Image (spheres, grey):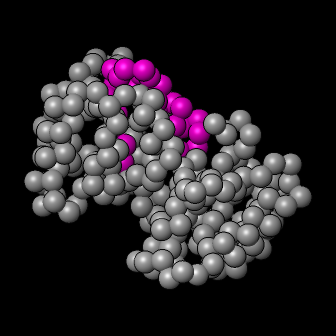
């Protein structure tokens, strides 16, 4: 499980990393740490995570503002607030900002891990809504159909899988390695231009003749599907 922890307490962050390594036998959890709100927001937009854990009180950018901006950018990664602020009003504020769960400090590790696993299960394809949206682009997973606005778009099976993966990580940068692994099933780069070809074909179908492009190439990093001009940072 790829986890982003946004926590300004260095000792607390390192302690949680050690605890997760112990609970997961060093393999279940991969923890990335950001020590302030701005860095956490940047990483949350750039990388794909299974769960994001956010401290409420952060330097540079408040934890709830981080969550709100991630949601505004189209990042729907399950997010859990971890905070010493535990009143009902604080919990409601966290959920209103877009958090999926709220755990007060001090916390029990066994409960935190259980909630993280539950959030990930909730986000798996079998449990998610069968409708994915990014701006005016919509995928119906049940009917295997794609539309942008009022226009139906015909995709080949591989193009559909590619778009589905990009939409599940909308607002985030998706690397070539991620696409090779999750769309093509490769664990290494076979030195092929298959991604470039499929991205080009997909872009021609979902962006051509529309007012603004959704599929961006991020030079030297990968690709990002955005919800429109107001979401581009």
- Residue at (42% x, 34% y) in the render: 39
Residue at image point 17% right, 50% down:
20
Residue 162 is situated, as x and y percent measured from the top left of the image, at 60, 69
Above or below: residue 30 compared with residue 89:
below
Image coords of residue 35 (percent x, y): 32, 31
Asked whether the viewer can see residue 203, the reply is yes
Q: Nearer the viewer, residue 197 or 96?
A: 197
Above or below: residue 44 compared with residue 162: above
User: What residue is drawn where x is 54% and y is 32%?
Assistant: 69
Which quadrant of the view contains residue 145? bottom right
Q: How far from the left and from the top, in percent, is residue 159?
A: 66, 74
Magenta stretch? 51-75
**In this rendering, position of residue 176 left or right of residue 135:** left
Q: Say which quadrant the N terminus sits in.
A: bottom left
Quadrant of the snapshot with the C terminus: top right
Vertical comparison of 4 with 28: above or below:
above
101 in magenta: no
Tell me, yes or no, if residue 143 can be seen here: no
Residue farthest along the right direction in this orientation: 209
């Amino acid at each position: 499980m790829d986890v982003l922890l946004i926590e300004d307490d260095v000792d607390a962050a390192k302690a949680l990393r050690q605890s997760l390594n112990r609970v997961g036998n060093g393999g279940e959890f991969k923890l990335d740490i950001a020590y302030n709100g701005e860095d956490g927001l940047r990483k949350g937009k750039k990388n794909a995570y299974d769960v994001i854990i956010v401290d409420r009180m952060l330097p540079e950018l408040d934890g709830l503002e981080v969550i709100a901006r991630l949601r505004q950018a189209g990042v729907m990664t399950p997010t859990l607030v971890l905070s010493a602020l535990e009143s009902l009003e604080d919990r409601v504020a966290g959920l209103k900002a877009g958090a999926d769960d709220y755990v007060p400090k001090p916390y029990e590790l066994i409960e935190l891990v259980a909630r993280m696993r539950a959030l990930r299960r909730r986000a798996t394809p079998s449990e998610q809504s069968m409708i994915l949206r990014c701006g005016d682009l919509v995928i119906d997973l049940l009917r295997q159909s794609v539309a942008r606005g009022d226009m139906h778009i015909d995709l080949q099976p591989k193009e559909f899988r590619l778009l589905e993966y990009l939409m599940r990580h909308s607002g985030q940068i998706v690397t070539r390695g991620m696409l090779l692994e999750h769309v093509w099933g490769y664990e290494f780069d076979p030195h092929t231009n298959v991604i470039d070809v499929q991205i080009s074909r997909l872009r021609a179908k979902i962006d051509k003749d529309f007012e603004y492009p959704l599929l961006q190439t991020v030079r030297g990093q990968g690709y990002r599907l955005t919800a429109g001009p107001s979401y581009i940072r």
